[in-house]
Image (tube, rainbow, N blue to C red):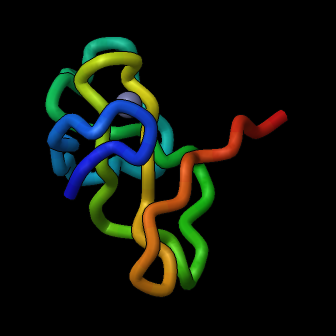
Amino acid sequence: MNCPEHSTTLIEKPVLYGYITPEQDTSGYLLGGCVVRQDSPEFGYECPIDKAVFYLKDGKLVKEEAEE
Ligand SMILES: [Zn+2]
């Protein structure tokens, strides 16, 4: 799986959902937010260059949209 923007190999990481306490070690995880939806992915892919996060959607890599 390569980054569509940098062609580097993306790092697969499990996604953590729910409330994260400050003591919790989240290195090695992607943060998925508080709400788990039915289509929430279990794994995401992080670009080692700009830390952009991608998810597989219908077999295609989709860049994570900034929420808020
Ligand atoms: Zn990239």
Q: Residue furthest right?
A: 68
Q: Seen in the image, is 31 located left or right of residue 1?
A: right
Viewer-side residue, 7 vs 46: 7
Q: Seen in the image, is 23 located left or right of residue 28?
A: right
Q: Give how far across and how far down residue 4 sits, in percent.
A: 41, 47
Q: How many marks?
A: 0
Q: Seen in the image, is 52 located left or right of residue 15?
A: right
The residue drawn where x is 40% and y is 17% is 50
Viewer-side residue, 42 vs 10: 10
Viewer-side residue, 5 vs 45: 5
In the depicted structure, whether residue 42 falls above or below residue 3: below
Pick the quarter of the image with the N terminus: bottom left
Viewer-side residue, 5 vs 27: 5
In the depicted structure, whether residue 55 falls above or below residue 32: below
Q: Give how far across and how far down residue 12 sits, in percent.
A: 17, 50
In the depicted structure, whether residue 31 falls above or below residue 58: above
In the depicted structure, whether residue 50 falls above or below residue 17: above
The residue drawn where x is 56% and y is 84% is 38
